[in-house]
Amino acid sequence: VEKAVADNAGKGEILSACEDLRERLEEARKKAVLFVVTTDDRAITDIKPQIKNKTGCSIFLDNAYYCGLELETVMRNRLKIGIVIDEDRLEKIQEESERSRALDKALGFIARSKKTEKQIGEYLAGKGYLPATIAYVINKLKEYNFVSDSDYAEDYVGAHSANKGKKLLKLELIRKGVSEKDMGTALDRLKEI
């Protein structure tokens, strides 16, 4: 029944699944088997737009506030008032929403100028995101080639080598979280110029 509802099956398929469940319950009753049904399912009773976050929605389960989700996540997961949802599934949806929100924040942060992985991590940590979410966002940014410590080091050395010495550049790159390998490559290119 849950699978049929989750797959947005037609009324006939849901009725068929219910009938199948009813038959299995009747067989169990005839065999004198004790059948206990437990559920963590709860009904979505309201979805309201958030006032401060224009892209967010507040989700209410059983008439009580449960969490805030991005509107995009609500639409992608087809959450509607009246549907019954398992709390585990809702927690996964909530994680997906948090990752999406964190990725948007990080993209806004790197849009102004290039950043290192460490700078992005510190920024997101300052916004209250969990380490697992931060790691996901940094990996996603690396996957899209939006962040690269080696490119950052080369650009930084190229832009500041006229005004700063090699030792100062090295200290600043260390402070920004650039690895020894990436820093060494960028500083070696400085010698070639």
Image (cartoon, rainbow, N blue to C red):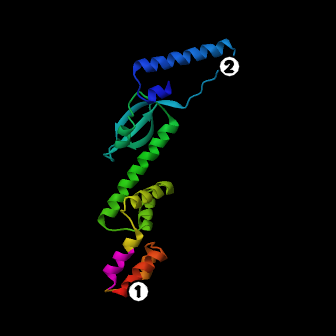
The residue labelled by disc 2 is: 34
| Residue closer to the observer: 50 or 190 | 190
The residue labelled by disc 1 is: 166
Q: Residue at x 37, y 68 (%)?
A: 115
Region rendered in magenta: 153-161
Q: Which residue is drawn at 46% across and 55% down?
A: 136
| Residue closer to the observer: 38 or 21 | 21
Secondary structure of the residue carrying numbered label 1: helix
The answer to which image quadrant residue 166 occupies is bottom left
Which amino acid, by three-letter code, is at mark 2?
A: Leu
Relative to 76, residue 184 above or below: below
Predominant SS along the magenta part? helix
Residue lying at the far top of the rendered structure = 30
Q: Residue at x 39, y 75 (%)?
A: 153
Which amino acid, by three-letter code, is at mark 1?
A: Lys
| Residue closer to the observer: 62 or 87 | 87
Residue 88 is situated, as x and y percent measured from the top left of the image, at 52, 38
Residue 33 is situated, as x and y percent measured from the top left of the image, at 68, 18
Mark sitting on residue 43: none
Relative to 121, residue 172 above or below: below
Q: In this view, does 79 lie to the left or right of 20?
A: left
Secondary structure of the residue carrying numbered label 2: loop
Relative to 71, residue 16 above or below: above
The answer to which image quadrant residue 63 occupies is top left
Q: Which residue is drawn at 30% across and 65% down?
A: 112
CA neighbours of label 1 inside 10 A, class few (<14), some (14 to 19), many (20+)? some
Relative to 2, residue 113 above or below: below
The answer to which image quadrant residue 58 occupies is top left
Q: Does the magenta stretch include residue 181?
A: no
Residue 191 is situated, as x and y percent measured from the top left of the image, at 38, 87
Residue 155 is situated, as x and y percent measured from the top left of the image, at 34, 75
- Residues under labels 2 and 1: Cα distance? 77 Å
